[in-house]
Image: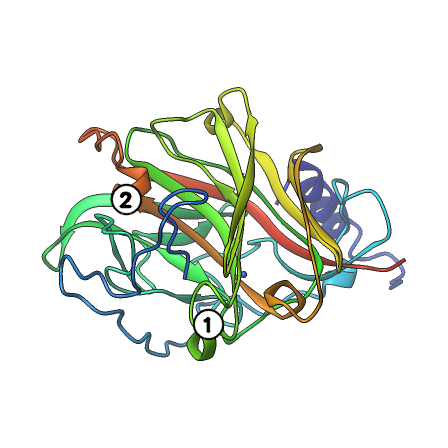
């Protein structure tokens, strides 16, 4: 939640007596080869997430009531958002989790619904990778997904966040096709809205993956890990445009119809450590904890 939104909420509280009026990334870096969904080196398969009750105060707010001083310019209508205006675990009505050692020979074990790895407070979500030897796993982290809860075809998908840094870190904001369990990867399609690796900390990557295609672009940012920035994709029937703040740095022109980018995708937010791309130049033992702090995640539909 931005400071402007916080001020607006405070003003609304003061006026309460007034008259009422009414996205399974398996990338070895952009364009690189992919690992299987089972971490074959460790012999560990993905765990099946269990169901947990919603954390307190997680009733979804109506997007139409949100005041958006930093909404994108153009004919966009907000259709889904998490502004993180609550405390505790991420809203179970909106988010699920990946679990286990999932891909790319990464070091972290993804944990489900553990406050130390994913929690909401002060209007922000924190995803944290820790070296804490939890249940025998040296490094833990969280990977939040909307699979089975929300998915979209076309629109603007954005996150305002401060990403971590350090050699070995690999934060990402991305999507996968909801049909991945039926058609597999890369046939399901993948949209990497933001990836960053700690050995190249000032470079933001935006990439698409589908059968026979691995294409992307980069933006040379100035220390993106020192403050909050907006990472977004504007996904149309004929193209995908990638943004760092207001800077459009890559366009993928779609060809044909009825491809993976004409079908629903679900969201993923995660911090990986090491692995085939993030660990390409090693992992600094002093990087922990790694924190990605997320102000909001929003999805808009285009209304021409």
Quarter of the figure that contains the N terminus: top right
Vertical side of 96 occupied by 2: above or below: above
Of the pair 95 and 8, the residue shown nearer to us? 95
Vertical side of 4 occupied by 50: above or below: below
Picture coordinates of residue 227, whole percent (x, y) = 52, 28
168 vs 146, left or right, is left
Residue at the extreme left: 136
Vertical side of 121 occupied by 23: above or below: below
Residue in the picture at 59% in, 49% down: 296
Picture coordinates of residue 276, whole percent (x, y) = 28, 44
Vertical side of 164 occupied by 6: above or below: below
Residue in the picture at 82% in, 42% down: 73
Q: Which mark is residue 276?
A: 2
Is disc 2 placed on a helix, strand or loop?
helix
Total numbered labels:
2
Picture coordinates of residue 105, whole percent (x, y) = 23, 51
Q: Which residue is mark 1?
A: 180
Residue in the picture at 24% in, 44% down: 130
Say few, some or many: other residues with alpha carbon within 10 Å of mark 2 (under 14 / 14 to 19 / 20 or more).
Answer: many
Residue at the extreme top: 222
Instruction: Tell me, yes or no, if residue 129 can be seen here.
Output: yes
Say few, some or many: other residues with alpha carbon within 10 Å of mark 1 (under 14 / 14 to 19 / 20 or more).
Answer: some
Q: In the rendered image, which quarter is residue 246 located in?
A: top right
| Mark 2 / mark 1, whichever is N-terminal | 1
Of the pair 202 and 183, the residue shown nearer to us? 183
Picture coordinates of residue 29, whole percent (x, y) = 39, 42
Instruction: Tell me, yes or no, if residue 89 can be seen here.
Output: no
Q: CA distance from mark 2 to mark 1?
A: 22 Å
Quarter of the figure that contains the C terminus: bottom right
153 vs 288, left or right, is right
69 vs 270, left or right, is right
């Amino acid at each position: 939640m931005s400071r402007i939104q916080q001020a607006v909420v405070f003003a609304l509280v003061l006026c309460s007596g007034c008259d009422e009026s009414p996205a399974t990334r398996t990338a070895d870096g952009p364009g690189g080869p992919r690992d299987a969904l089972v971490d074959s080196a460790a012999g560990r398969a993905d765990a099946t997430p269990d169901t947990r009750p919603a954390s307190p105060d997680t009733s979804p707010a109506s997007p139409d009531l949100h005041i958006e001083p930093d909404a994108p310019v153009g004919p966009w209508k907000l259709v889904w958002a998490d502004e993180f205006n609550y405390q505790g675990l991420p809203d179970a009505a909106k988010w699920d989790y990946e679990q286990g050692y999932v891909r790319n020979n990464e070091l972290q074990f993804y944990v489900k619904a553990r406050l130390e790895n994913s929690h909401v407070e002060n209007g922000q979500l924190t995803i944290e990778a820790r070296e804490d030897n939890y249940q025998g796993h040296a490094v833990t982290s969280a990977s939040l997904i909307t699979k089975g809860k929300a998915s979209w075809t076309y629109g603007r998908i954005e996150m305002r966040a401060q990403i971590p840094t350090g050699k070995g870190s690999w934060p990402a904001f991305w999507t996968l096709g909801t049909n991945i369990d039926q058609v597999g990867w890369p046939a399901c399609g993948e949209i990497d809205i933001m990836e960053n690796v700690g050995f190249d900390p000032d470079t933001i990557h935006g990439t698409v993956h589908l059968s026979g295609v691995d294409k992307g672009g980069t933006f040379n940012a100035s220390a993106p890990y020192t403050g909050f920035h907006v990472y977004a994709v504007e996904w149309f029937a004929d193209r995908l445009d990638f943004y760092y703040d207001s800077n459009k740095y890559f366009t993928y022109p779609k060809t044909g119809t009825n491809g993976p980018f004409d079908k629903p995708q679900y969201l993923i937010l995660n911090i990986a450590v090491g692995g085939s791309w993030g660990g390409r130049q090693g992992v600094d033992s002093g990087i922990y904890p790694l924190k990605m702090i997320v102000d909001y995640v929003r999805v808009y539909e285009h209304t021409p």
